[in-house]
Structure formats: C-alpha cells, structure tokens
Amino acid sequence: METILVLILLLSPFIGFSINLLVGKKLTGRTLPGIIATTAVIISFAISLYFFIRNLSTGEVIHVNLYEWIALGGFSTNLAFTLDQLSLIWLLFVTGIGALIHIYSMGYMHDDENVDRYFSYLNLFIFFMAVLVAGSNLLVMFIGWEGVGLCSYLLIGFWSKDHKNNDAAKKAFIMNRIGDLGFLIGIFTLGYLFKTVDYASLRDVVTSPDPLLGVATLALFIGATGKSAQIPLYTWLPDAMAGPTPVSALIHAATMVTAGIFMVTRLNFIFDLTPDIQTLIAIIGAITALFAATIALTQTDIKKVLAYSTVSQLGLMFLALGLGAYHVAVFHVITHAFFKACLFLGSGSVIHAMGGEQDMRKMGGLKNKMKTTYYTFLISTLSIAGIPPLAGFFSKDEIMLTAFEHNKALWVIGALASLLTAFYMFRLLYLTFFGEFRGTEEQKHHLHESPGSMTMPLVILAFLAFFGGAISIPFGNLSWLNGYLEPILPGIAGHHPETAQMVTTMVISTAIAVIGIILAYFKYIKKSEVPAEDSKITGFAKVLYNKYYVDEIYDALFVKPLYVLAGFFENVVEKLLKNILKSFGGLVEMLSIPARRLQNGSLGFYLFFFVLGFSALIICLFLV
C-alpha cells in the first residue's frame, strides 16, 4: 500500500502532464487543462500531507525500493525513494504552494492559446521536483535535478515568439549545465570513495575527513551555486522573469532554486567534515546576499526587483548552511516560500491589471483599486523585511543570530543586506501602490482587482507569511521545526542560545528593518520621488541599474570568445576537413576509372583472372 501511495504521489503530476500534452488541444474549453493539472498536484499534496501526519505521530520513515538500478563492480544503487522528515517538509510546500500556483494560473493564463501546453509543463516541473526531493540517493536526485532544469527552459521560454524569452531560456539552461557538471563530479567522487551514493549508506561510511572529500563537497557546492543562483552562476535567475509570472513564483519561491539548499542539507554529515568548504559557502552566501541587494535598489521592473531579492535571500540561506545552521536555512526556505510566492503572484496580479506593464515608474496609486492584492502584498513585504511577529522576522533573525555567534564580519554583511532588503521592498511597495497613478488613461480605465482564482492563493500565502514563523519560535523548547528535524540534523533540538543574546539580535534586526522602511518612506512618499528614465540615470546608480555590467563582462570573457572559436572551426577547421574528405573521394573516383574498364563483359578475360586468383590461393595455402 505504501509503495502504491508513493508512486501515486510522484506520478500524479506526470499523468497530468501526459494528458494535457497528448489531448489538451482536444479538450473542450480553456478551463479543463487547468483543472486536470491542478487536481494532479492536489492529489500529490494530499498524499504528502497523509505521510507527514503519519510521520509526525509515529516517526516512521517510508522507504520504497523499486529495483536494483546499477550494479557495477563494487558499486551498486537502487531506484528508491525515501520519505523522511526533510523530504516530507519539502514535498509539503512544493506540492502545496505548487497547487496554489496552479489555481492562480487558471485565472492568469486563461486566455493564452497554449494553456494546455503551459499546464503540462507546470505538472512536469512538479513531478521532477518531487523526484528530486524524494529520491533516496544522489543519482535519483540527479534525475529530478536535470528534470527541473529542462522544465525551467520550457517554462521560461514559453512565450517563444519573443526572441528575448528564448535567449533567457537558453541562458538558464546553459548556466545550470555548468553547475550540473560540478554536481556530477561530486557524485562520481563520492561513488569512487565509498562505492555508494545512497544517503543512509553514506551516513554510515563517511566518518573521517579525506582530501578527496573536500573535492566532492566543493564540486557539489558548485552544483548548488548553479541551481540556487549564487555568485558567479546567478545571472540566469533574473532573466528567468521572461516566463509567465506564475512560473516565476514556482521557480523562485519553493521549488527549483531551493534544490541546492536541499542537497547541502541532505548531505550535512559530509559537509561537516570539510570546514574549509563550509567557510567558502558562508562567504559566497553573504557576498551574494549583499551584491544582489544592491542591484535590486535601482531596478524598475517589478519582477526584476523580486528576482534579485530571491538571489539575496538565497545568499542568506547559504550563509546559514556555511555556518552549520542547516535547520535555520530550512526554516528560511519555508518562510521564503510563503512570502516570496505571495509577492510574485501579487506582482502578477498588478501586471494583469496594468495590461502587461511591469515598469514601476508607470504604476502608483493601485492601493484603492486592488485592495486584496495590496494588503497581501503589504503583509509579505513586512515579512521579507523582517518585521516582528511575521514569519520572515523569525527565520531571518535566526540567520543573523547564527552569524553573530560565529563570524562578526559575515554578520555585518548580512545586516547590510537586510537593511537594503527592507529599503528596496518598500520602495517597490510605495512606487506600485501609493501616490498618483502614472500610467496611461487606457491603463487607468483597465485597472481592476484580479478574479477570485488569483486572489484566493494570495490570501492563503499572506496568512502563511504572517503566521508561518510559529513553527520555529527560538525561545525554550518552542521550536517545533528543530524537534521535527532532529533525526536528520542531530543535536539541533537541544541547542539554545542565551536569551539575552537572542533578544539583542532581535532588537538590532528589527531596528535595521525599520530604518530601511523609514528611508524608503522619506524618499518615495514624503519626497514623492520616481526613478529616472533609463537615459537619465547617471553615476553609481547607472552601474547598479546595469547590474554591475556582469552580463557584459561574461559576454566579453566567455560568450564572444566562444563565438570566435566556433567561427574558426566553421570557417577553417570544417572547410579543411571537408576538403580532405573530398580529396579522398576524388582519389577513389580517379581509381575507379581504370577499374571500370576491367568490367568489359568478356568471359575469357574473367576466366583468366579467376585462374590467377585460384593460383594465388594455392600458393598461399601450400607453398608459403
């Protein structure tokens, strides 16, 4: 029975994908593909919830071994799935928030001519993410890892008639392949060292440091930087905004970008043995958090601000991972899934009302026209800014507390990133919902609140963004999450920092957030400033607006040299090979001219050569 339920959990989205892909065009109306896809994800969510409640009461881990997949020498691995505390938490918010995004998409994508294909890709994405999370070894995880990369390519480039969308899809796919190579090297290294890539087996045999273990964890971290958009492989994620807004919410909130966090947390017992790599992870995470936050300060595209916000928040999660606080990173993944999904879907509601406009300079005054969108967006903005008692406050404060305990320099960097987060998020809120409307009369006439299928997910996510922090209140034994993750991350339930230190960091974190909000208020409400047009941006603001010209640097260092190399192979090497092969063909053709004359139809001539051949055969057999 367990095996059947686990297979239904995993395969339900795949069945929804297959139905919509094969017969979606033939279904009556535009609503049915969305209903099929949403039902498939809700089924997965319901089964995940059942196993979660069962695990909560009994502590039982569900393990399903389908068959032996690879047996090569001393190495073997199975096609198997494990539903333990970590994978069940991930499955809950992947399928739960995924279901809400599917419901939202039914309203947002209703008029799209390819709505059946859209929902098929969305279902496939959930299927691969579930495989990634539920796999019991690194090779099964890699199937899901590559699968979500493929689906991101399909969804980012969904509106393929616009060439920019295709470029963004290719960029995401190629940059992820760079990280995936590192992930593969890490898997091969662990397989070589320990003859297994199964999590449970690795936990038993990995007991002491090894030089090659550092190579493995570094390679795995490179894989994580690609999937979870850390420096230097982060530039694909902001460009992923080319896809439909629900896709942005799905990729950026609860699924693909958290894969790297999941992988490092799952292999925590290996990373704990390589402290140098952990330090590198913390440094890269902190720098990414601050770097992306500075870029978000000047962006005018509402979705680009949220995209760089995601990169920054992921950086804070990696900061926690690098400091060994895996449970804190998981906590922030969960709260981030709530408020960031709400923010992206809220931005989609605004874009929907604005007739596709994404430039905040042409918005303003939407608060009274879109009250549900505004209030849900406000709650999520307060949450990401770190205002108590919202969910984001508790998870972000635990990251800052961990950094304060372990490395004051990294704490300072994280604090600056948090200050900028509060500023640019309220900049976005003020420019979008406050002041006078700055769009066209046609847009003003078109303004309206989104339909119920779009606002209902916003309300649920805003509720979770408000109260979700209750799962890990840091005082005493009030952290349910820490106790639940104890079997995966031993020792965390009993770790309690001093109350005075916790209160101090909470006060400082709150003060930092309030300062950022006040600065944004004076700039964009009191002074009513509006970001300048692109051509009028000067100085360092122009550098930030152009994202430190990192894309241009990558283009000069990697893309253009590759094009030159490709041109050399096309124009020189390929032509040379073509001429060489053509000369062989000419030689054969030249030799064939006298050879053709031998075929003259004379029986005596043929008998003569037969005798010669037979004589040669006799000589070889008896005389040589």
Image (tube, rainbow, N blue to C red):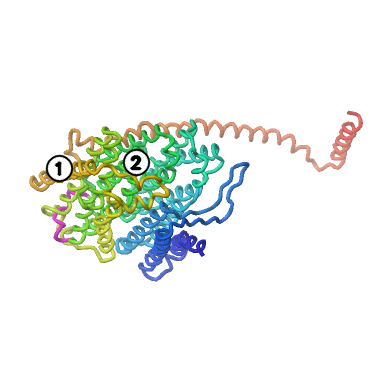
Q: Secondary structure at mark 1?
A: helix
Residue 54 lies in the magenta-colored region = no
Residue 501 rendering spot, x and y as whole percentages: 23, 40
Amino acid under label 2?
Phe
Q: Is residue 459 above or below residue 523?
A: below
> What kind of residue is marked 1?
Ile
**For this rendering, which residue is in front, 197 or 347?**
197
**Residue named by callout 1:** 515
The residue drawn where x is 9% and y is 47% is 528
The residue to which callout 2 is attached is: 318
Q: Up-down: is 98 above or below 408?
A: below
Q: Is residue 267 visible?
A: yes
- As drawn, the label of residue 269 is none
CA distance separating discs 1 and 2: 25 Å
Identify the residue at horizontal 29%, vertical 52% (top origin).
478
Q: Nearer the viewer, residue 137 or 439?
A: 137
In this image, 483 relative to 370: left or right?
A: right
